[in-house]
Image (cartoon, helix red, strand yellow):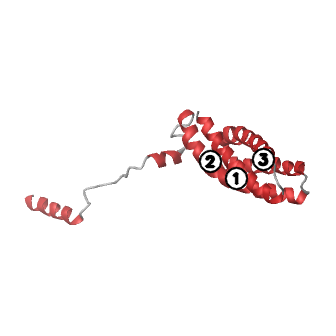
Amino acid sequence: MKHGLALLIKFGLVAIVVFSIFSAFQNVNVWNGLFISIVLVAAAYLLGDLLILRRFGNVTATLADFALSFLVLFFYGIVLGLPYGHAGNAAAFSAMFIALGEVLFHFFIQHRLFRESEFTDEDQPHVRQLINKGLRTETSDEVFPYDVRRKNEKKEKKE
């Protein structure tokens, strides 16, 4: 169930970007767009989200998703019959928008999916900071220095 929601969110992100960008360069068939979106989501989820994100973090996983998206979508553009320049531009813009969405998606994955199963708060210090929202204060006897001075004067008078 946890992976199903994550895959659905990722599929929505990738499908919207693929249909938006590639329809500007060529009339994309719905079935071809859905097929390439499913292939890209499956590959990126297995490689980028389940393997690289767990071991190397958000930045590395986002860069890996950008590279994988660019390569898959570039070859998809070539298969569609786009010239190399148009296929490269469409793939670069699509990969850039997918990578921007992946930053937020990785945050969601780290804090919703991985946190319950594998990571502890000690492994991720930023999680501890987000969870621990209580304020900590430090107090001492000298909070009001003039009161301490009066107490000291009273002690000196007694002696």
Pinpoint residue 45: horizontal percent, then vertical percent. 70, 40
Q: Circle 3: is it few (<14), some (14-19), or many (20+) Cα within 10 Å?
A: few
Residue 157 visible from this viewpoint: yes
Measure the C-alpha gap from mark 3 to mark 1.
Answer: 23 Å
- As drawn, is 13 to the left or to the right of 110? right
- Residue 97: x %, y % from top left: 71, 56
- Position in image of residue 104 (x %, y %): 61, 51
SS class, disc 1: helix
* Helix, strand or loop status at disc 3: helix
Where residue 116 appears, as percent x and y from the top left, is 53, 35
Asked whether disc 2 touches disc 3, contact meaning CB atoms under 8 Å apart, the reply is no
Quadrant in which the C terminus is drawn? bottom left
SS class, disc 2: helix
Say if residue 95 shows up in the picture: no
Query: Which one is nearer the viewer's eye here, 146 or 54?
Result: 54
Q: Is residue 18 left or right of residue 55?
A: right
154 or 98, which lies in front? 98
Identify residue for label 3: 30
**Disc 1 target residue:** 99
Camera-side mark, 2 or 3: 3
Up-down relation of residue 110 to residue 146 (above or below)? above
Q: Residue at x 69, y 41 (%)?
A: 52
- Cα–Cα span, label 2 and label 1: 9 Å
Q: Nearer the viewer, mark 3 or mark 1?
A: 3
Q: Which residue is mark 2?
A: 105
The number of numbered discs placed on residues in the rendered structure image is 3
Q: Residues within 10 Å of mark 2 (few under 14, many from 20)?
A: some
Q: Amino acid at mark 3?
A: Val
User: Which residue is at a point 67% across and 38% down the rendered structure image?
Assistant: 50
Q: What residue type is disc 1 on?
A: Ala
Looking at the image, is mark 2 or mark 3 earlier in the sequence? 3
